[in-house]
Image (cartoon, helix red, strand yellow):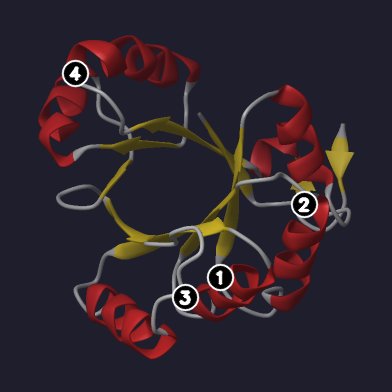
Amino acid sequence: ETYSSRGNMKDKLVWIKADEGDWEDVKPVVIKALEAGADCILARPEHIERIRELGGGTIASTNGGDIVLYPVDTMPDAPPPDKDSLIADIEALKSTGREVAVEVVIRGKTYELLAAQLGEHCDFLVIISTDWRVIPLENLIASLQDYDVRIIAGVKDSSEAKLALETMEHGADGVLLS
């Protein structure tokens, strides 16, 4: 199957979420991800060396990975964090010369708008939806099309992945599999 705009499915990224649980919990996931050729593994900092011993690959982590993971705290029923201080943090991380992935949980329109603003400053925008809907992803793809950011959509299953990768013809640049 081909996708307009950027070519075919092989241009899409597959990230694997392996940043929850102890090493024995995530090790089988990491092994399968490496064997399948995943583009990136989200990992806890204390697991990075063990992942590298298994064969490496690109690792995103809050500390010590190839890509700096910057999770934005979006708590239910709480006001969104200050956009300007988040942008300053992202710019400081980018000034180190490393790629930055900002992870935002979309909890409504306010967080969708925040994600769009942060996406203008990072290399990867990882979006997780608490109630998966296509509209936030469509809006983010449209608002960030002129920026050099790759949108990675968190998905739970293959039908969500297919939908995310086909949204607005171009789709997300990749998926984060939980």
Q: Label 4: few (<14), some or many (≥20) within 10 Å? A: some
Q: Earlier in the sequence, mark 1 or mark 4?
A: 4
Q: CA distance from mark 2 to mark 3?
A: 29 Å
Q: Earlier in the sequence, mark 4 or mark 2?
A: 4
Nearer the observer: mark 2 or 3; the answer is 3
Residue 177: x, y in percent? Answer: 54, 31
Residue 69: x, y in percent? Answer: 32, 55
Amino acid type for the residue under numbered disc 3: Pro
Q: Which mark is residue 79?
A: 3
Q: Which mark is residue 171?
A: 2
Amino acid type for the residue under numbered disc 4: Trp
- Please, what secondary structure does the residue beneath circle 1 have? helix
Determine which residue is flagged by label 4. Answer: 23
Determine which residue is flagged by label 1. Answer: 115
Position of 26 relative to 111 (above/below) = above
Q: Earlier in the sequence, mark 3 or mark 4?
A: 4
Left or right: 69 as drawn, with respect to 131: left
Q: CA distance from mark 1 to mark 4?
A: 31 Å
Residue at 64 percent of width and 42 percent of height: 12
